[in-house]
Amino acid sequence: MEFAYNNYLFVFYYNVLFFHMFFCCCNIYFYSVSLFCIFALIDIKPGYFPIYEIMIFKNLNISKQILMALEEAGLEEPTPIQEQAFAVIRSGKDMVGIAQTGTGKTLAYLIPVLMKLHYAQGSYPRALVVVPTRELVVQVCESVELLTEYMDIRCVGIYGGTNIRTQQAAVYEGVDLLVATPGRFMDIYMNGIIRTSQIKTVVVDEADRLMDLGFMPQLKSILEVIPEKHQTLLFSATFSATIAEMAQEFLAPDPVRIETAAHATPVENVLQIRYDVPNIATKINLLKLLLTDSEEFRRVMVFTETKRNADRIVEKLADYWKDGLSVLHSNKAQNSRLNALKAFKDGRTRILVSSDVAARGIDVQEVSHVINFDIPSIPEEYVHRIGRTARAGKEGTAISFVSEKEEEKFDKIEQLIEQKISVTDLPEELEISDLLMDEEKVQTANIVYQRGKPMGGGAFHIKSAKNSKIPQKSRMDRTKEGRRKRR
């Protein structure tokens, strides 16, 4: 009986297991058929989900020649500003583009503009790019050269501080895309070399910086000589009241506005650090201490508010890293500035000390750290400075040296970026200096307060008789009292 019972029990469990597996297989078959039907109905293949599609340049209807150049440069995915701006620019509408520093604004306007130019044609420029500094002119021209590897487009850059005749000759030979600083453009235009009748597209890059440097009159002059029917594109990292005013004056009514980040928002990949430092001498000591770690501080940009501080830093650091040091500010000769920037870009120097002239638009890859030796007076400059690191989605660090006098400036920066940056303790091995520079010393005027009735007749005093060129007797005769005595 026990053996028969065990057999029945075995058969029972076997049947339960068989039917369970059968129903599982049916369910799998049912779900597979259902999925197949769904994919068939919406005409897509399994494994393809458009919502998770990564946008690539090939999907943006870019010309084959530019795609080949982008592929050679290793660029495959557009940034948000590029993805959104291409269609608007190609439509011919006026546009304001606001995007964080380091997010590819230059390519955002160059690619569609170059596609509109298509090939070399005529002798006069058909597109104009206006930028605030000569370094930016060089950089934009380099980007054009990269994109036109398989195109026949003539690009000429003109800027001050160099031989104007050479630039005039280059423009006279024929140009399709002209990249210029405002002052040099007007100089060559007034000499009768630049003809603007064929210009259909005007790009104002780093618009806020142009305003800060006082180029508004030159911009007005440039746009006055451009044909009335043209497309104007305004690009900036920040959207301030001055940019809104510029857009209202220079652009068509209701231009398209593309803003890929909140106003004055730093790139998320930037780690922001603050040190409270008492004076300039201690700042220099802290800078030397940090730069000693060459493995962590692989490529560093040091920004100063003044040219004097830039020269001081170079003077103090030259004994330690003379061959690995470049300096960039407006007092340097043009060739010296370009060579310093090129050496830093090429990796021949590890440290670039610069005034704010290089804080805008200069595209240097792999910058590990940005150090704010001085806190900028204009809060927006902070955003542009730290945008030199963490470019193209990479990570970076921004370090600020804040003195007691600069705390108010830094508070305004924190209000602008809507972030509170915590203070980091100074390294224990840092040497705190008591030395004060001339500009740090408190200037007190030696004012002597006189008690009682003040002597003298104010700012203008009557000359004494012995110092007068007119004899005393004649002077008396000319007064009312002298005339009475003569009577």
Image: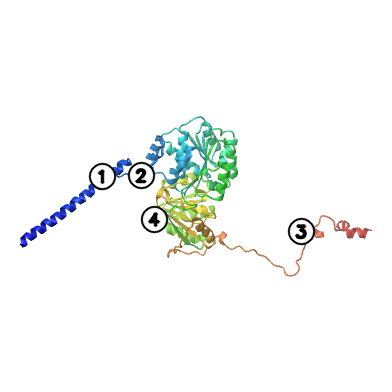
Q: Position of residue 158 (x, y in %)?
A: 53, 39
**Mark 2 vs mark 1, CA separation in Å:** 21 Å
**Mark 1 vs mark 3, CA separation in Å:** 106 Å
Q: Residues within 10 Å of mark 3 (few under 14, many from 20)?
A: few
**The N terminus sits in image quarter:** bottom left
Dot placed on the residue nearer the N-terminal end, 3 or 4: 4
Q: Residue furthest right?
A: 487
**Mark 4 vs mark 2, CA separation in Å:** 40 Å
Q: Which mark is residue 296?
A: 4
Q: Quadrant of residue 75?
A: top left
**Residue marked by disc 2:** 50
| Residue type (three-letter) at the residue carrying disc 2 | Pro
Determine the residue positioned at 62% across, 64% down.
444
**Residue marked by disc 1:** 33
Q: Position of residue 114 (x, y in %)?
A: 46, 36
**Mark 1 vs mark 4, CA separation in Å:** 56 Å
